[in-house]
Amino acid sequence: MKVFLYCGVMHFCITNGELNMNTNISAEIIKITPDHAGELLKNNTINRPIFQQNVRKYSELMTNGLWGLNGETLIISSGGKLLNGQHRLLAIINAGISIEMLVVFNVNEELFDTIDTGKIRSAANVLSIKGYSKKRASMLATAAKLNISMRNFGTIEGANNYPHLVTPHLVLNEVEGDKDYAESANFLLGYKDLPLPAPSFLFLVYRMFKVDREFSTDWLHGFITGEDLGKGDYRVWVRSRLWKNEISTAKLRTTTRLYITTKAWSYAREGLIVKEKTIMDSGPGVLKYLCMEGDRRALAGGVKNRTAISRTLIK
């Protein structure tokens, strides 16, 4: 491989490689304009179908200055066909801005099936790379995504509805920017058997600690272990329902399990006396008990489109 400078740009040339069938492969960093992107897409004849969600995600990252030159390439065949990069090119057109990209030329078209076959890196993967254990990374990634969703969409469903906005980069910043995530995870990992899935349970623990740590520490210990729970304790009702759910063929949604747990915690904290049916009839509205300063910021500000929401997310 030869490396040299051409017009101030680092340029690579790999020649006579066995896999590229004696063609010359070269790579160059080029600023791709919307017009350039349109021209390249005219030769996009052998790629997979367009996934519009990816186009929106990349476009919004570019618009908000979060797209960087990370080494991923646009790949052009020796015959001029686009082999890799269609979503990024469409995003450039949608964003209406020019983006620097590493472009590889003269790749053998017969090797197309070997390109871009890896698994997409998830938020949990990014946290694992940063040194978190696999289990802790999974827990923290889910909790952070649910918190980002609550703060910006006023619901825990936002992470599912707008997955292209709740990016691994945002999740990493969320986790590393608040030590309470680590402390909440340490608390939960101190128990072996949990009545809720650990990743989504961490979201509740984190929020409960933010609202009332002293009360929540004791309440959660009893809820998790079942120790010293008297008759009529709301935790007994919820634990019973959750354990029955484990052997039932009609499973409760994870969100429903979070809702009834939240309602039991809130009513106990406020000292309210209610019937079991009141606890079990719980929906998304109970999340108001877990609201913190800044929640629903995007919706309260009248945000009505994805680009505006994405700008709110990165502030």
Image (cartoon, helix red, strand yellow):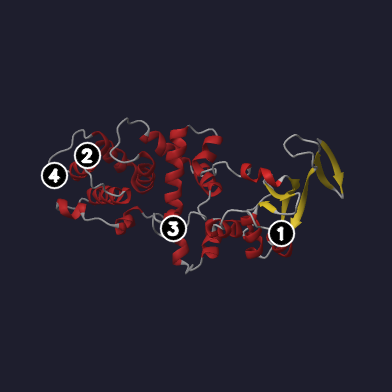
Distance Cα–Cα, label 2 vs label 4:
23 Å
Dot 3 or dot 1: first in sequence order is 1
Kind of residue at badge 3: Asn
- Nearest the camera: 204 or 128? 128
- How packed mark 1 is, by other alpha carbons closer than 10 Å (few <14, some 14-19, many 20 or more), is some
- Nearest the camera: 63 or 22? 22
- How packed mark 3 is, by other alpha carbons closer than 10 Å (few <14, some 14-19, many 20 or more), is few
Check disc 4 and report the residue beneath it.
232
Residue depth check, mark 1 versus mark 2: number of the one nearer the observer? 1
Distance Cα–Cα, label 1 vs label 2:
55 Å
Q: Is residue 79 left or right of residue 306?
A: right
Q: Secondary structure at mark 2?
A: helix
Q: Residue furthest left?
A: 231
Check disc 2 and report the residue beneath it.
247
Residue at 45% of width from left, 49% of height from top? 145
Q: Is residue 263 left or right of residue 21?
A: left
Residue at 44% of width from left, 65% of height from top? 299
Count of numbered circles in the view? 4
Is residue 274 visible in the rendered image? The answer is: no
Distance Cα–Cα, label 3 vs label 2:
30 Å
Residue depth check, mark 2 versus mark 4: number of the one nearer the observer? 2
Check disc 1 and report the residue beneath it.
40
| Rendered image quadrant of residue 315 | bottom right
Distance Cα–Cα, label 4 vs label 3:
38 Å
- Nearest the camera: 215 or 130? 130
Residue 286 at what x, y percent from top left? 29, 56
Check disc 3 and report the residue beneath it.
161
Q: Are marks 2 and 4 in contact (CB under 8 Å)?
A: no
Residue 23 at what x, y percent from top left? 79, 42
Dot 1 or dot 2: first in sequence order is 1
Q: Are marks 1 and 2 in contact (CB under 8 Å)?
A: no
Residue 72 to residue 188: above or below: below
